[in-house]
Amino acid sequence: VVLFFLTCWFLLVLSLTTLSRGASYTGSINISFFSGYINAWNQWSTSEFQLIIFNMLMFSPLGFLLPLLWKRAEKLKVIVITSLAFTSSIEIIQLISGRGIFEFDDLFNNFIGSLMGYFFIMAILGSLRQRKFEIASILRALIIPSFVSIVVGITFLIYELQPYGNMSILPSERQNIEDIDIQTELDFSEKSATAAIYHNIHAGSKRKMKEIAQQISELEDITFSNTEHREGNNFQMFGVNPNEIEFGYTYFTQSGTWWVNNTNSWESASLTEDKINIYSQKYERWLSKNSLLPKAATFSTQDGNYLRWGCEEPEDIIDGGEDFCSGGITLELDEQENLASLHHFISQNQFIAMEEIISPRQAYEKVLDGEFYKYEPFQKGDLLVIEDWKISYTYDTKGFYQPVYEFTGYINDTENTWVFNIPAVK
């Protein structure tokens, strides 16, 4: 029976980690320890944290079942060697088949999970054999889950207590720039300055997500299900109107933006000037009534197919002092002139504070240290040319609009343009 369950477990793990994926990772190796943890922190991604815990729990059955099958596996040394051999085999299969990435983090997480299962079964076996609770074994079984719970709790507490969110533009590991040449003709000042911080007032609000869903439901007579589907840090809901037309609603929690669309196939309506006036007034009234349309937004159309309200970001936001809106709202109707798509990506940014920022020289030194994100690693002999820099803005994981140094240039030739950001707040 135990052998049957172990076989099922191994086939399930092999299916989840290898067989269910396409061969699109050929030769991919990540030997940087805890890069997955750092990436989950920078992105503040619930799905990334869940994946780490899942990778631990996935190998717990190995440590739990093997001592029941094999007497020698009751020794810690045996379970350590066996679990490392199993998880290494999975990672090697992924590497050879190209159906996954060989990662040290996975080796570590899987190993911890197998130890967790091992300590649990040994506590059970010890208590059964002694016919009483074996306190020492029970305490050993609780060490790993307790430690993981404490670390997770401290991580979330630190995140909640810090004044601003994390910067998702930060890399999980530094770029290896030892074998590349970095060139620039720019002079970087060592003088520090201050810059404004803003906050998107709707970012991270689950209450706002439900409120907007209710408002859309009343406007378009859509009945949304009570089930909320979580996609990473975003929420999705699905509904249907009296004509049996299905709609999807997505709320992007970190930005406070949202999108509702007819999930069936449709073609855009080509509206006359009169129709544009009718529908623009209808939706303007609804948007204004629900505080979804800033006064600064201006209306425009595109080819009679799209209705759009937009806000231009001011040029002097670094100086602070005033709130502003940015982004837009796009509306599209189908050929029957029913709602096809409504995308609300206006951010209402509230001025929060002035903060000290690092100097351009300090930002450039971070470039020289490889503290920036690049999807494809540099190759030996690459030439990185920095042509310009400016202070730009980006949202952090709590919806704060933070200043960043934006560097632009190219890699090897002028056609291979390159843009990346360095956080500016000290």
Image: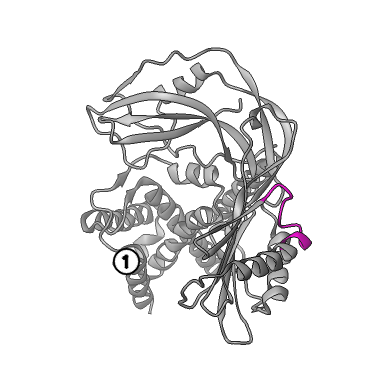
Q: Residue at x 56, y 69 (%)?
A: 272
Q: Residue at x 39, y 56 (%)?
A: 75
- The quarter of the image holding the N terminus is bottom left
Residue 300 image point, x, y percent:
59, 55
Q: Residue at x 51, y 75 (%)?
A: 263
Magenta residues (range): 287-297
Q: Residue at x 42, y 61 (%)?
A: 59
Residue 4 image point, x, y percent:
35, 78
Q: Is residue 372 above or below residue 13?
A: above
On whether residue 203 falls in the magenta region, the answer is no
Front residue of 77/37: it is 37
**Left or right, residue 172 beside residue 200:** left
Front residue of 325/50: it is 325
Q: Is residue 250 above or below residue 384?
A: below
Question: Which residue is the site of mark 1?
Answer: 14
Instruction: State which quadrant residue 74 falls in.
Output: bottom left
**Left or right, residue 285 beside residue 92:** right
On whether residue 288 falls in the magenta region, the answer is yes
Q: Single out the residue that lies furthest toward the bottom.
A: 243
Instruction: State which quadrant residue 141 falls in.
Output: bottom right
Q: Main secondary structure of the magenta part?
A: loop
Residue type at the position of mark 1: Leu
